[in-house]
Image: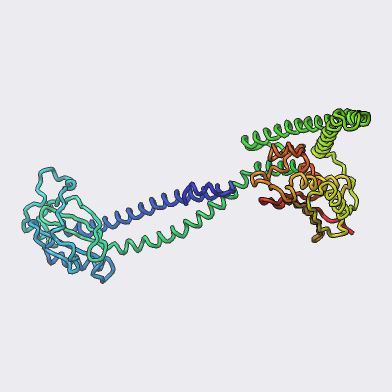
Amino acid sequence: MRLRGLTRFRSFGLRIAVLSCFVSGVALAFFGGLTFAAMQRLSLRRMDQQIKEFAHRPLVEHQDSLEWERVGSALRFFLEGDDENTFILLVKGPEGTIQFQSPNWPSDLPATAIPAPDAWGEYPPGMPPGTPSIFPPDENVVSQRAGGPGPPSGRQVPPVRLKTPEFSTRGAGGAAWRIGLMGTSDVTVALGLNMERLNAEMVPIRRVWLTVLPIALLLVALGAWWLSQRALKPIQAVTDTIQRVKARGLNQRISVQEGDREFFELITVFNEMMDWLEKSFHQATRFSADASHELRTPLTVLQAQLEQAVQEAAPDSDERRRYVAFGKELQRLKSITQKLLLLARIDAGELRLNLRPLDLSELVEGAVEDTETLAPQLRVEHNVTPDLSVMGDDVLMKQVIQNLASNAVKFNREGGFIRFDLEGDGGNVRLVVTNSGPGIPPESYEDVFTRFYRGDKAHSRRIGGAGLGLSLAREIVRAHNGALLLEESSGDTTAFSVQLPGARA
C-alpha cells in the first residue's frame, strides 16, 4: 500500500496505527536484512577460515599428488560425510599442470578457469624481504617435511611464504561452492566447500525472522492504536463537549487540567471561544427578542389605525385600496415579527410548551378544509387516519401544519394538487404533505430549513414570505421530540414529512 492510500482512512487513530506499522515494518525489514546479511557474511568468513586451515599445512609441507589424495580423504572424514559433493579440490603445479583433481570436480568449471593468486602475503617472522619463497630442498628439509628425523641440531626448516588467499562463490555442477585460492611459488590450490550446509543453517534463522516479523508488526500496531487513543483523549473531550453544546446549550465547558502543553492550550482556547460565543449568542438572542417584542405594540397601533382608515375611506377609492395594501404588508410584518420572537425564545431555551393530548387527525382535517377554501384552483386530496393523538401544544402544532399547507399552496403550479397523508405506525404518527410544483434543486436540500433562505429569489418575491416558515416549523417539531424532513423533491413533486411520537392511552 502506498503512503498516499493511507490518507484515505477516516480515523486519525487508525492512520497513526497503520503508519506506525508501515514505518516499523520497513525499519524491521531493513535492520533484519542487515542482520541476516551480517550473519551470512560471518558464516562465510568462518567457512573461509576453515578452507585456509584445511589447505595451510599441505601447502607448507609441499605435498605430492599421493599426499593430496590423502588430504581429500582427511577432508571427507573431517567434514563428517561420505558425500562426494561435500568439497572439491584442485592442485596445480608451477606450469599450470594438474597435480591432483578430485573426482567430483565440476565439468562446467574447467581447471584453466582457476588462476593462481597474484598477491603475496606478509613475510613470516624473521624472514627478510628478497628471501626466496621456498629454499632449495635438501635431504634434511625433505626428511623433516616427510616426518623424518629432521636436520642436525641447530638447523631449522626455512619458512615458506604463502600467497594471499582469494575467496569467491561460484555455481557449478548444480551446486554453490565457496572456493578459496591459495598457493606458493610452486603450487596453486583451489579448495571449495559446498554451501548447502551453510544455506541450511540460515534457513531456520530466516524462518524465525519471518515468523517474528508479523507478530512484531501486530504488537506495534496495537501499541500505536493504544497510544493514539490515549493521545486523542483531549480531542474526544472537545468532541463530547460540542455534542453537549448542541443538546444542552452554550454553557458547556471542558475541565482544564495540567497536562500536555499543546492540549492544555487547545482546551483553554476552546473554552475562551465558547465564552465569547455564549456571550454573543445571548446578546443576539436578547436583541432579537427585545426588537420583536418592542415592535408588536407599534405594529398593533398601526394596524388599528389602518383598519379605521379603511372604514372611513370611500368605497372603491384609490385611498381605500392603498390602505388595504398597507394593511396586507403590515400583517406580513406582524407575522415575521411573531416568528422572530418565537425563534428567539426557542434559541434561548425559553419556549414553554402547553403539552396535552392533541387530536392530530382533527387538526389535519381542519387544514384540509382551510386549503380547499383558500386554494379552490388546486385539487386537495387527503388520506387521514382518524383518532391519532400526540402530546403537543395546540397552537404551535397548528402553526406547523399551517406553514406546510401554506407552502404547498404558494409553491404549486396552476391546476396542481395537494395531498395530506396521516398514519400511525408503531407508536409514532407520520404526516406527509405533498404538492405538485417546480420542486427543489438537489443542491438546496440542506438549505430549505435555513432561516431567511429563499431558493428562487424572483419567484419568492412574487409569492411573498420571509423564509422563516420551515425553519420555525422544524424547531417546533424538534421541541415535541419529533422530526421534520424533506421526504421527496422530484421534478414536479415535493413532499415534507412530520414524524411525532404518539400519545399514550
Question: Residue 498: x percent and y percent?
Answer: 78, 51
Q: Nearer the viewer, residue 341 or 362?
A: 362
Residue 217 in view (yes/no):
yes
Q: Would residue 300 be seen by someone viewing this image from the given angle?
A: no
- Which of the colour schemes (rainbow, by chain, secondary structure, one colour) is used? rainbow
In the image, residue 251 lies at what x, y percent? 77, 37
340 left or right, relative to 447: right
The quadrant in which the C terminus is found is: bottom right
Q: Is residue 407 left or right of residue 182?
A: right
Residue at the far front: name it.
Answer: 316
Residue 276 vs 31, above or below: the answer is above
For the point 65% across and 37% down, the residue is 259
Q: Quadrant of residue 234?
A: top right
Seen from this angle, which residue lies furthest bottom? 82
Count of residue discs: 0
Query: What is the x, y in percent for residue 261?
Result: 62, 35
The answer to which image quadrant residue 461 occupies is top right
Q: Nearer the viewer, residue 502 or 441?
A: 441
- The residue sitting at 74% across, 32% down in the picture is 275
At 89% across and 29% down in the image, what residue appears?
A: 306
Q: Quadrant of residue 453?
A: top right
Choose between 472 and 434: the one closer to the eye. Answer: 434
Observer-nearest of 168 and 230: 230
- Give x and y (percent) for residue 495: 73, 51
